[in-house]
Image: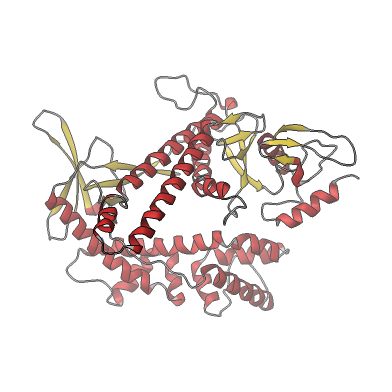
Amino acid sequence: MKRTVRLATLPLNKNKYDETRSVIGHYSDAKRVFVAHLRQTSLWRLLDRSKSFRDYAKAQGLYPEGINVHLVDQAAFDAVDTCIRHIESCFVRANVKARVWRRFTDEDERHYAYACLTRYSAIGQIMGGGVPEISTVTTSPETGAKIASYLHRVIRDALDGSWPTVIKSHSMSLDSTLYSVVDNDTAKGKTRRYVKVVSSTRNKRISLPLSGISRVSGNVRVVLDEENKRAFIHVSYDVAALAKATGPAVSLDWGITEVCTDDSGVHHGDEYGRALSSMAKRRHKTAKARNKLHALSKRDAGSRRTKHISRNNLGTKKQKARLRRAKAQLQTISGAAIKEVVYGEGNRTRANGRAPQHPSQRPKEIITEDLSHLGGKAKSKKISRLCSSWARDENQERIMVHAHVGGSGIKTVNAAYTSQTSPNPTCGYVSFDNRSGDVFHCRNPYWDCNWQGDADHVASMNIKSRIQDHQIDRFTPYTEVRKILDARFPR
């Protein structure tokens, strides 16, 4: 596993900034042509290997003249990666894997369908009306045609005619041949590290001074910061993992009043809710005021008052800075909470000469709920505003990284009705009335269960028990989950 670190440069002078923006512009122009060309499904066979598309683009004369060939190679590789990410994101938003799981019950049919979804050559063949042949899976022609026909409809609906494009020219990807790293001494006797990147001029490179001393190697990405007239160098480092964890498994319920709650009832990151609520309220208040000013500027368009409002009250510089600070605060809180779960309280880092943690102090398995299907508006506008800022995807990514570092496994289960089901093994009553806000109270009408507690704690307990449930898998629809839970409830 790798993690990307963003290294900032010092503010660039006008010449360096303009040269960097120029070469990034040439890079983006080439990438734009490549991405548009890859929209043809007949070329998706080239997505399985980026070098194949590079050779194809050269043979077709798609490479622009007068630009470093190696830089255009990176633009071709970047275009392939962008198209792959777009296809995969469309599949995730449309729950393609879940739909395939529910559609086909035979293991061989599922195996063939999933094998097709992992090969872009097969996806392109399906979208062209063909039936791909998978060497690792044996199916009859009739079965293959049936599965290909279904996948064609599902993929067509998932993509919905969309395709990426390059709009802004603000970044470029470079391999080790397109940049070099040198250290020079400053007038004050300090060492300054420079990253010399390729420029638009032959045999000339642009020296970007880093704000600190950090290791730069492998493929990097140069990103322009137009607001501060500087650049960021994105560098990927290998993440070193600790010994395999042997402690008891832990389950987590993600929340918006806290980062998460484990099956022991411990809330991690209690200040998360206050920060998230404050951020949502501030954005809502600011948006209402700005909407009024927008309406006023439209009504009196061209007047002196409108020009003054547009110049002094409808800018985005302070608004973006405020949002950036609020998100950084949420990231700090969630990061600390997730480290508590993985490494334990007081063991968030291994810095400052702390004694190494024993594997038995870290959970061997972390069980989380699958929230990838959530989207759209909630019944409450307040909840919708909170959830729009809720970094559930980022929290899931953080827990995966720290679980890898801590030697813990990650499992994801179906989250349907986990906070509305009584955790009492002899009860199991499911009802919307069992939960009111953060309070859980079993309302079993048949006998007195009367289980009371924190709703997030109840949810994490049910998440932990669901890992052993063979009837409810990750992709089971919530309506089917309700039927299964109701059938188990003894009346």
Given residues 489 and 375, the one toward you in this image is 375
Which quadrant, please, contains the C terminus?
top right
What is the x, y in percent for residue 333? 47, 33
Please say whether residue 348 is visible from this viewpoint: yes
Given residues 108 and 202, the one toward you in this image is 202
Residue 476: image quadrant is: bottom right
What is the x, y in percent for residue 249? 65, 34
Please say whether residue 4 is visible from this viewpoint: no
Residue 303: image quadrant is: bottom left
Q: How many marks?
A: 0
The residue at 42%/41% (across/down) is 327
Q: Horizontally, is 17 left or right of 55 in the view?
A: left
Residue 64: image quadrant is: bottom left
The residue at 12%/57% (across/down) is 203
The residue at 45%/77% (across/down) is 42
Given residues 200 and 364, the one toward you in this image is 200
What is the x, y in percent for residue 100? 65, 64
Which quadrant, please, contains the N terminus?
top left
Q: Horizontally, is 449 left or right of 407 in the view?
A: right
What is the x, y in percent for residue 186? 11, 33
Q: Is residue 379 above or below residue 245?
A: below
Colour mapping: secondary structure
The residue most toward the left is 187
The residue most toward the bottom is 129
